[in-house]
Amino acid sequence: MSALAADIPTATFVEVTEVWVPKDGRLVWSSGNYGALDDFAAASEKQSFAKGEGLPGKAWEEARPVVLKGFDGSYFLRAEAARKAGLTSAVAMPIFAGSDLKAVVVVLCADDAVRTGAIEVWHEEAGVLMLDDGYYGAARHFEWVSQHTHFPRGQGLPGGVWAANAPMLMRDLGSGYRFIRADSAGKAGLTTGLGLPIAVPGGKTFVLTLLSARGTPIAHRFELWKTRSAGPDGAKEAVLTDGICQRQGPLWDDETETTVAAWQGPIGQVLGSGIPLVKFDSAAQTAGYASMVAVPIYRDGAVAHIVAWYY
Amino acid sequence: MSKAWHPIGQLTDIPKRGSRCVATPFGRIAVFRTAEDHVFATEDRCPHKGGPLSQGIVHDASVTCPLHNAVISLETGEMQGPDEGRVRTYAIRLDPLTGAIDLSLAEAAADMTQAAE
Ligand code: FES
């Protein structure tokens, strides 16, 4: 696998990932990875948001994922710091346990002519999933195709996530008809797709997709974990059900189960706390990659899955 | 071991870039027809999570699994990309004049005998 590892490019589609958690009626900073953007990190760590305020507050108030393209003159509170850091777009993903907000995950991207990838929000309307909005970087044609595509339940990556009400990892996006936008995805160099069901109060259906491209990947490793109870005391554990790793090959060996207990490593921490986590600079815990993001996926008020990506 | 060939049908029974399944004592075998009218046979079970490859789409000499889009080489049975895994492939022949397709289960039978020993 060393040839593959040597191929791993360093430019990524997402520049910043941060987690905000509610405390005393406001969203405060919990964890984040800002790469070299120290000033933006400093501006962020001391920020907090009331419900409805800024991008995280909007995702909280509206109880839906929000895509924001262009910060100037918008409700984005850190617009000046973002502009200086070259950040141009953001997506906020609220994490609800039933009607309780547990956290808001925000990813921020920088725009240029080469960075390709996609972060999309799909919502159900009249029995099909329609594109709410998405950020695609330089993948303009793919953006156009997405805007003109809708997914019945069970079809494509968004429709598959909707039908299963579970996260899903799609391999080669450019090669199949199940990924309906395959032709355009192939041309845009999109390779791996991660689809997440976003639980919100009131039972509306939202699906978020992260589509990673070869040249500017969102991540080099993806993991899907499923939670289950372990033992009579109600303790929970997570079992690795699927994954892709550019270094390690398949992560879905059905014969030898990989499990973690609550509070064991970063996945266990997400399982124990129910709060998303961004970690970096601790290679042992981030599978040999510099950084990781792990997000709990709730169903019926409890953590049902954990998804993680490493970059 | 000499190959025993079993007639399983005609090329035209299989849609171009599609497949048909054959039930055998060794499980369901998917028989694929490429755009260039080459035929391949593999077990109808994706090495990833068992997806029905016969319902995948055929491109060049590969098939994309309908469940999670893994791409599998029809020639070698190997999964492409960072995933590793392979499906069993079966010997198959096409008579260019009559379009008749024959399948051999000799390798599968040999493996079975080995496993039993
Ligand atoms: S079962 Fe074939 S790709 Fe998952």
Image (cartoon, rainbow, N blue to C red):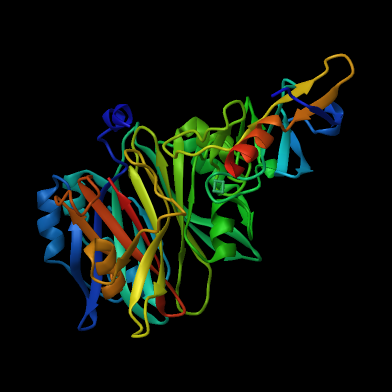
A118 horizontally vs A268: left or right: right
Q: Position of residue B71 (x, y in %)?
A: 55, 36
- Viewer-proximal residue among B68 and B40: B40
Residue A63 drawn at (x, y percent): 41, 73
Look at 78% across and 27% down and name the residue there.
Answer: B4
Residue A55, can we see it? no
Left or right: B57 in relation to A249: right
Q: Is residue A106 above or below residue A98?
A: above
Quadrant of the rendered image containing residue A107: bottom left
Point 30% across, 28% down: residue: A7
Place of residue A240 in the rendered image (x, y in percent of width and height, measured from the top left): 39, 59
B114 and A69: which one is in front?
Answer: B114
Name the foreground residue: A276 vs B49.
B49
Q: Along the horizontal axis of the image, is A232 left or right of A43?
A: right
Which residue ends up furthest to the top in the rendered image? B97
Q: Residue furthest front?
A: B117
Instruction: Tell how many labels.
Output: 0
The answer to whether residue A125 is left or right of residue A8 is right
Above-or-below relation of A287 to B87: below
Query: Where A126 falls versus B105 (above or below)?
Result: below
Quadrant of the drawing holding the C terminus of chain B: top right
> Can residue A210 be seen?
yes
Quarter residue A106 falls in: bottom left
Based on the displayed image, in which of its 4 quarters is residue B55 positioned?
top right
Quadrant into which the N terminus of chain B falls: top right
Q: Position of residue A209 (x, y in %)?
A: 45, 53
At x 63% / y 58%, what residue is drawn?
A154
Please name the residue shown 35% across and 71% down the image: A237
In this view of the protein, which residue sits in the foreground, B88 or B65? B88
